[in-house]
Image: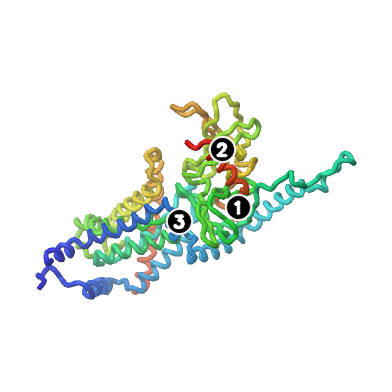
Amino acid sequence: MFSSDCRPWGPVFLKEAIDALKKTQMNLLKLIFLFLLLLLVQVFILNHIHFRGYINPQIYILFILILPARIPGYALLLTAFFTGLVMDLFTDSLAIHTASTLFAAFCRPAVLRLVTAGSKQDSETDPSFGSIGGLSLSIYSGIIIILHHSMLFFLEIFRFTEIAQTLSRIFQSAIITFIFVIIGFALLEKRAGSQSR
Amino acid sequence: MRNLLQFIYRYHFFLLFVLLFTLAMVLNASRQHYKQAFIWHSANTFSATLFQVRANLASYFHLRHVNQRLLEENAKLLDRLEENFVVAEDTTRIYYDSLSQRRYTYTHADIIQNSVTRRNNHITLNKGRDHGVLPDMGVITPYGVVGVVKAVSSNFSLVNSLLHSETMVSVKIEKNGHIGSLQWNGENYRIVEMAYIPPHVELEEGDTVVTSGFSTIFPENIPVGEIIDWKIRRGETFYTAKVKLHLDFNNLAHVYIVKNLMQEEQEELENHASPDI
């Protein structure tokens, strides 16, 4: 009934997602733990850092960045939607985190392909220092963070008269988030490395 | 049918993105309708309870500061006690009779969620409809204006902070009574702008700005801050002054909700007298 490139729906889709997880060093439990950790850090600590008055690092985007590369598209989007929704629930912000995290997740596969295109690895490798290298990882994280923050701040403040101020907010917050994300990547990798030894 | 399924399968990533993104934008669009949007705010029971726990913990770290303020407030109130005044003439007595009618009542509330980093900041309070809080009531401390109640649930209320683009407060300069309107421009959360001061008014650094009492929301003469800078902007004919707030919104914990008992009466009269506006 179906042609070869049109696979059936349902459980097979789910199986695909689980298979993708199995092939990486991360398992579901670890991801859930990471999600909860990032949620707590974001909501109870980072949301109360008011660097220079209005700059908040949005570390939770690390969760979208660190997901395995083989994760199927729909799982990526649903995860992003859920992550954003939880953040919105805890930061009193309707659905701006949902929309911007979703947008970041939508752009992720393309950006990941872009940064791994020239290298020896294929786009199947998971984003980390060890697999794609520091430079590629920085570019990949940087682009996604800029996209995410642009969406976030423009949804929050949409006024033409305040456009310069909004851009400076995006830029400054993105830098701080970037630093936190890179530290996050490094810490997680170090932990994983020491465990495997 | 087969082609349709194939199409959906091939583009499911993009289609799902569009679907979810539309959903998120619909949620965002409900921003205007506070009552519907209320479910997304921390005033919904689950996250409100969590924030209450956090606020309880955090309040310990502010105790010294809060005590200091309470002492100052107490001293001020003690100053006003009748016993402090020696009656100058034996024949004079103070009567409390029907000539003085109550206009404002105050309810105490704790802040359980607050922010200063966004362009539009909201505050959640732990008092709601069950405690007599209604939308459009003012929220103050003795050191300044905090905001206006925007929506209430039975036990919590959501306040548009002064640090919100929709909050405008009618204020005046204490020494000469000239009025203006106070609004935040979204930059430094310690500094707000007082607009529409006529250019003939003589301003000085350190002039105190207090509420005017013209709006039906805030009582008169609550200190707000002091003027630190002023200028006429390009293309405008009025001064805009920068006002440094007495209040630091970042360590705010306890506030008073003001109910104006004559609000309805005043608004009714004003609307009746000027139906065009």
Tell me whether circle 2 and circle 3 mark residues in contact (CB < 8 Å): no
First-in-chain label (2 vs 1): 2
* Pointer 1 residue: B257
Chain holding disc 3: B
Tell me the SS state at disc 1. Answer: strand
Q: Is residue A185 visible?
A: no
Q: Which of B172 and B59 is in front in this view?
A: B172
Front tag of 2 and 3: 3
Cα distance, mark 1 to mark 3?
A: 20 Å
For label 3, count other residues whose C-alpha is less than 10 Å away and answer few (under 14), some (14-19) or many (20+): few
Same chain check for tags 2 and 3 = yes
For label 2, count other residues whose C-alpha is less than 10 Å away and answer few (under 14), some (14-19) or many (20+): many
Tell me whether circle 2 and circle 1 mark residues in contact (CB < 8 Å): no
Q: Residue at x 32, y 60 (%)?
A: A65
* Pointer 2 residue: B243
For label 1, count other residues whose C-alpha is less than 10 Å away and answer few (under 14), some (14-19) or many (20+): many
First-in-chain label (2 vs 3): 3
Quadrant in the picture for the N terminus of chain B = bottom left
Q: Nearer the viewer, residue B246 or B180?
A: B180
Front tag of 2 and 1: 1
Amino acid beneath label 2: Val
Q: Residue B26, relative to residue B227: is it above or below?
A: below
Q: Residue B246, relative to residue B9: is it above or below?
A: above
From the top left corner, tell me how far across and down residue A151 is, in percent: 34, 50
Q: Is residue B138 visible?
A: yes
Q: Which residue is drawn at 57% across and 50% down?
A: B137
From the top left corner, tell me how far across and down residue B29 is, in percent: 37, 52
Quadrant of residue A107 within the rendered picture:
bottom left
Chain holding disc 1: B
Quadrant of residue A29 within the rendered picture:
bottom left
